[in-house]
Structure formats: structure tokens, C-alpha cells
Image (cartoon, grey):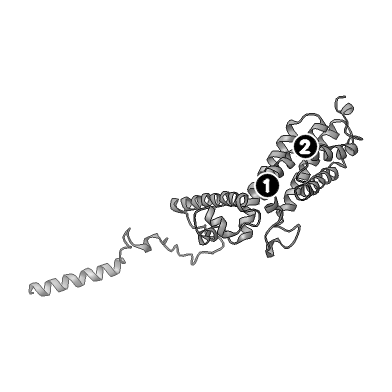
Amino acid sequence: MSRRSQRHEDEGRSRRDESRRGRPGPSSGDAAADVPPDDGAGAADPDSAPPPRRDKRSSRWDEHRAARRQELTLATIVAIRTHGPDVGMSQVAAQARTSKTVVYRHFADKFDLYQAVCERVGAVIVGQVQEAMREAGPPQETLLSGVDAYLTLIEADPDIYRYVMRPPASERSSSAGGPNDFVGDLTSFIGDFVGDVISTELRRQNRDATPATTWGHALVGMVRSVGDHWLTVRPEVPRETIAAEIADLAWQGISRTVNQAAASA
């Protein structure tokens, strides 16, 4: 047999052997190498399939987006203080030294940005009121401290307060008490906290704590209403005067149940 014939026969035998054994799997550089082998059970149930793995690059990108969103939120707060509560997205972008396109890349719309600002401002309001009431001492001082803490924030940042209390027009902000009603949620949260403070004091005196929730929300509603009026109509009146007037009125009712003599008993 000639060398050429022998070579053809060897190549043919090699191909037949390879066909019987099955071709080797793809190399590590092949994209198909990441596909798991078929276990003979058929296609996997999509409902039971594990979620795709996220690599470190994806996690870092999430952190970057969160950080950038926070930066833009802070830039919006500065822009509100500079341009007022009717600040526009162009002014926000200019404050952040970027473009409106970049802002909209991180916020779906103006209402989304409003919510981000509200979350940050709301955390400050709640924190300040809670801290003031926890550290005040006797019940009457606690009441005055809570009122004064709320009014102090209004006085320090009037345009931020106006911005938060006037959500931009949006289908998501059209229904009061809905899932996107920040003002209602904030008022309700503080009202619950004040109610808890009153309830704790009533129980400490072995008194009926049933009215505590009603009183807590009534107080917060009164403070908010007076604060809005003060900011709009009577800004020349000192904050301390407004706080004392609210606290005096509220204390006349609460003191029938929570009073200094009972508190010190």
C-alpha cells in the first residue's frame, strides 16, 4: 500500500473513532462552556430555576448608581435653597454640574426626585423631633420641645419645607393617602410617635391610655397647620412665641390627665 493510501486510511479510522466516542466539549474559552450539561430530565422549570449570578462588576455598578443618586439628591436640596421650592430640573442639573439627561438616568421623573428628597428630609425631621422629645424630661417640657423642634426645621429651611409639602403634579401624587403620599406618611409617623410618648406617660401613672393615639395625631396636625400659617402669613413672629402658644393650648387639655403632680407621684 502506498504512503498516501495509508495516510487516508489512518485519517478515516481516526474520524470513525472520534464519531463513536463523541466529540470533545468546547474549550474553556468557548461561550457554550458556561451552559450546564443536560441531565436527561428535560428542560428546567423556569419557576424553580435559580436566579442568575451577579458578578462583582454588577455589584460595584449598583453601588455607583446608589451613590450617584444620593449625590444628585443632595444637589437638589442645595438647588432648592438657591432657587426656591419651584426649582426646575435644569437648575438641579446645573447645581450637580451635569445634564438633565444624566439626572433622568437616575430618576424616572420629577416626582421620583421629589420622593428621594422627601426621604432624606423626612428622616431629619423625624430624628430631630424624636431626639428633642426623648431628652426633654417632664411631660410639659417634652411637648414644648417636640413642637419647637418641628418649627426649628421650618425656620431653618423654609424653601425645603415648602418643596416637601407641595409635591409636583403627577399621577402618582394625585391621591392623598395613597402609596406615594409622603406628607401624609410623615404626619402619620410622627403622630404615632407622639401618641406612644403620651401613652407611655399615661400608663406610668396607671391611667387610661386609650386617647393617646388621638391626642398624638391631633397635636401633630395642629403643629403642622400652625407652622404652615406662620411660615406664610406671620414669619415675623419669633419661633419661640409660636411654639409656646401651641404648647400652652395643647397642655390645657392634656394636663387634665398628664400633669406635673401625677408625673412626680
Q: Nearer the viewer, residue 160 or 212?
A: 160
Q: Residues within 10 Å of mark 2 (few under 14, many from 20)?
A: few
Determine the residue positioned at 36% across, 63% down: 31
Give the side of residue 93 with respect to residue 143, left or right: left
Q: Which mark is residue 240?
A: 2
At numbered mark 1, what does the secondary structure look like: helix, strand or loop?
Answer: helix
Q: Which residue is mark 1?
A: 122
Circle count: 2
**Position of residue 143 measured from the top left corner of the image (x, y, whole percent):** 80, 36
Give the side of residue 212 with respect to residue 35, left or right: right
Q: Residues within 10 Å of mark 1 (few under 14, many from 20)?
A: some
At numbered mark 2, what does the secondary structure look like: helix, strand or loop?
Answer: helix
From this view, report whether residue 157 is shown above or below residue 10. Answer: above
Determine the residue positioned at 21% across, 70% down: 13
| Residue type highlighted by circle 2 | Glu
Q: Residue furthest right?
A: 256
First-in-chain label (1 vs 2): 1
Determine the residue positioned at 68% across, 42% down: 156
**Position of residue 122 measured from the top left corner of the image (x, y, whole percent):** 68, 47
**Position of residue 14 measured from the top left corner of the image (x, y, whole percent):** 21, 68
Is the C terminus in the top left, top right, bottom left or bottom right quadrant?
Answer: top right
From this view, report whether residue 191 is shown above or below residue 101. Answer: above
Q: Which mark is residue 68?
A: none
| Residue type highlighted by circle 1 | Gly
Is the N terminus in the top left, top right, bottom left or bottom right quadrant?
Answer: bottom left
Q: Nearer the viewer, residue 210 or 77?
A: 77
As measured in the structure, the alpha-carbon distance from the residue carrying label 1 to the one carrying label 2 is 22 Å
